[in-house]
């Protein structure tokens, strides 16, 4: 039985990944921003364990996690949570920048740092669910893209640093996916939302698990998933 720590398991891609792992009997540790959210996640995924830590305040993660029981083994750390606020560089102020960078970039880097000793012992796997915006930036996507470009750099550096320790690192770049986040993006864009027009979260989950389940003699470093219609 493998042990996984997942951020963003409450909905969308994170929920799809957690469901697949739970169905096959793996042990889930799910990060929640507060106790109420943790209770919801345990009900959503019976038998799972939760850790409480707010990705919006990465400076506090070390202290918060240090007060809680943590997994003694970790086969994968799956970074799936994220936030997005659209707007032009000329309009968005530091509040949006700081929140976006904290949740999408600094918190994943900090969580990885905190769990690296456990991952090294297990020769585990770190997966960063990035975005097509981590490969190219469009108008009004600058803040979000900056966080995702940075996350790509974190993954690339981590892969080079930890290869000798047996830790695998994968970045998955999904295109637009039918998630609650995508629905909010459409609202910000002022466009009607049709979930059937976009990638199903389960399809991205398949890509994530393909990387995780790959035999140990290989590593998927980067995987781009695009809408098929």
Image (cartoon, rainbow, N blue to C red):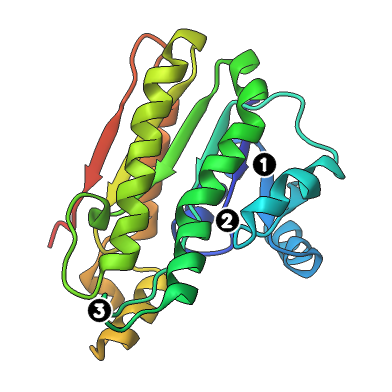
**Disc 1: which residue:** 28
Helix, strand or loop under label 2:
loop
Badge 1: how crowded within 10 Å, few (<14), some, or many (20+)?
Answer: many
Q: Quadrant of the N terminus?
A: top right
- Could you say where residue 45 lies in the image, as x and y percent from the top left? 68, 54
Q: CA distance from mark 1 to mark 3?
A: 38 Å
Q: Residue at x 34, y 64 (%)?
A: 144
**Mark in front: 1 vs 3:** 3
Q: Mark 1 or mark 2, which has the lower sequence index?
A: 2
Rendered position, 215 above or below 116:
above
**Mark in front: 2 vs 3:** 3
**Disc 2: which residue:** 9
Q: Residue at x 51, y 67 (%)?
A: 99
- In this view of the protein, can residue 178 be seen by the observer? yes
Q: CA distance from mark 2 to mark 3?
A: 30 Å
Q: Quadrant of residue 217?
A: top left
- Residue placed most toward the observer, 212 or 115: 115
Q: CA distance from mark 1 to mark 2?
A: 10 Å
**Disc 3: which residue:** 88
- In this view of the protein, can residue 3 be seen by the observer? no
- Could you say where residue 64 lies in the image, as x and y percent from the top left? 79, 50
Q: Residue at x 55, y 15 (%)?
A: 123
Q: Quadrant of the C terminus?
A: bottom left
- Residue placed most toward the observer, 222 or 139: 139
Position of residue 26 in the picture relative to residue 42 (left or right): left
């Amino acid at each position: 039985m493998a042990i996984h720590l997942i951020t963003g398991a409450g909905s969308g891609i994170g929920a799809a990944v957690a469901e697949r792992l739970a169905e096959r009997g793996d042990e889930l540790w799910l990060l929640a921003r507060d106790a109420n959210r943790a209770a919801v996640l345990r009900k959503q995924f019976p038998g799972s364990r939760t850790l409480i830590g707010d990705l919006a305040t990465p400076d506090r993660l070390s202290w918060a996690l240090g007060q809680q029981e943590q997994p003694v083994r970790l086969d994968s750390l799956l970074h799936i949570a994220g936030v997005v606020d659209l707007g032009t560089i000329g309009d968005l102020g530091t509040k949006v920048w700081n929140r976006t960078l904290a949740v999408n970039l600094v918190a994943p880097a900090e969580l990885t740092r905190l769990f690296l000793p456990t991952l090294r012992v297990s020769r585990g796997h770190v997966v960063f669910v990035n975005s097509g915006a981590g490969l190219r930036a469009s108008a009004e996507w600058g803040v979000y893209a900056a966080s995702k470009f940075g996350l790509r750099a974190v993954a690339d550096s981590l892969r080079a640093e930890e290869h000798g320790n047996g830790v695998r690192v994968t970045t998955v770049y999904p295109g637009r996916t039918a998630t609650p986040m995508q629905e909010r993006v459409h609202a910000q864009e002022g466009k009607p939302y049709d979930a059937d027009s976009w990638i199903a979260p389960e399809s991205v989950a398949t890509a994530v698990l393909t990387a995780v389940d790959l035999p140990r003699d290989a590593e998927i470093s980067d995987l781009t998933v695009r809408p098929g219609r």
